[in-house]
Amino acid sequence: MEPDEFPEIDTRTASIARLYDYMLGGTDNYEVDRRAAEAAEDLMPGSFALARNNRRYLERVVRYLAGECGIRQFIDHGSGLPTQNNVHQVARESGAGSKVVYVEIDPVVLAHGRVKALMAEDDSTAFIEADASDVDLVLGHPETRRLINFDEPVAVLYVSFLHCIPDARDPDGMVRRMVDHLSPGSYLAISHLTADTPESRERMTRFGVESTRGHWGRVRSREEVASFFQGLEVVPPGLVKATEWHPDGREEEQSEEFFEYGGVARKP
Ligand SMILES: C[S@@+](CC[C@H](N)C(=O)[O-])C[C@H]1O[C@@H](n2cnc3c(N)ncnc32)[C@H](O)[C@@H]1O
């Protein structure tokens, strides 16, 4: 993208949505994002593979939820820029009529022409510009109310997202308030950046905070990620490396030190 294409967008600071887009091979990013992505790869080798593996995890999760669990309503928090195999497309391959609400804070995602094209062609999909930690805003948004029937099961996705939420913004409370609103038979799906030692987690957290200037939270331990599922039934194989969750052979080799945990749970 050209720096002056969207005047409302800060092109001097890397954004996690654009950096991630670059890691996935997209073109909706700026020089500052590309530099930050390459710096991430230098500091934490395997970061690009990790991003691609996460995206494939998201596809497998949505396929499982729509195909095996019969879910037809999705709220995808921190959806990122449209890419291939977006949630609504994967969901509809397995379940006709699926409705999807995307929640995203990054203005480039919402300003993007493809988002507008996608919305114009499809009234069962909506993009909401919101901070996902404002659960009341998400739940009360006219598009959520139009598309989601909370008397029926809903899948709530926080995929490669909760590490963007600092503890001060209470990610546990955010997930809890959302899950409390769901009917029995609903699902919560998560992937979350982690590293195997406190020092590596600290390194990864510092990198995110410094390179995205505040649009970042914290890389958490396995116990901390597992606690998001409190009170829910985690489906097999449990909370595992995202590459090990229902693998389909497209997983790429990635770092043993830095990876994402992935898991899906059902509300009883
Ligand atoms: C690493 S991307 C993950 C994209 C997608 N979920 C996936 O797994 O492919 C994280 C996304 O969360 C968005 N994000 C960060 N903080 C947010 C917030 N408080 N509310 C909504 N979106 C947020 C970022 O803009 C970014 O697009």
Image: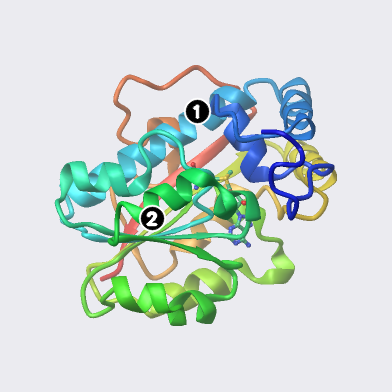
Q: Indicate the position of residue 258 as horizontal and vertical percent values.
A: 63, 31
* Residue drawn where x is 58% and y is 35% of the image: 21
Label 1 crowd bin: few (<14), some (14–19), many (20+), radius 10 Å: many
Q: Secondary structure at mark 1?
A: helix
* Residue drawn where x is 84% and y is 42% of the image: 12
Find disc 1 in the rendering and name its residue: 52
Q: Nearer the viewer, residue 41 or 192?
A: 41
The mark lying in front, picked from 1 and 2, is 2
Q: Indicate the position of residue 223 as horizontal and vertical percent values.
A: 56, 54
Q: Indicate the position of residue 69 as horizontal and vertical percent values.
A: 18, 54
* Residue drawn where x is 21% and y is 50% of the image: 66
Relative height, residue 172 to residue 114 (above, below) = below
| Identity of the residue furthest to the top in this view | 253
Q: Nearer the viewer, residue 152 or 128?
A: 128
Could you tell whether 62 is left or right of 29 in the image? left
Question: In this figure, which colouring scheme has been used for the structure?
Answer: rainbow
Find disc 2 in the rendering and name its residue: 119
Residue 3 appears in the figure: yes
Look at the image and tell me in which quarter the N terminus lies.
top right
Label 2 crowd bin: few (<14), some (14–19), many (20+), radius 10 Å: some
Q: Secondary structure at mark 2?
A: helix
Quarter assignment of residue 148: bottom left
Q: Nearer the viewer, residue 126 or 46?
A: 126
Marks 1 and 2 sit apart, C-alpha to C-alpha, by 25 Å
Relative height, residue 55 to residue 99 (above, below) = above
Q: Indicate the position of residue 2 as horizontal and vertical percent values.
A: 72, 34
Q: Nearer the viewer, residue 236 or 13?
A: 13
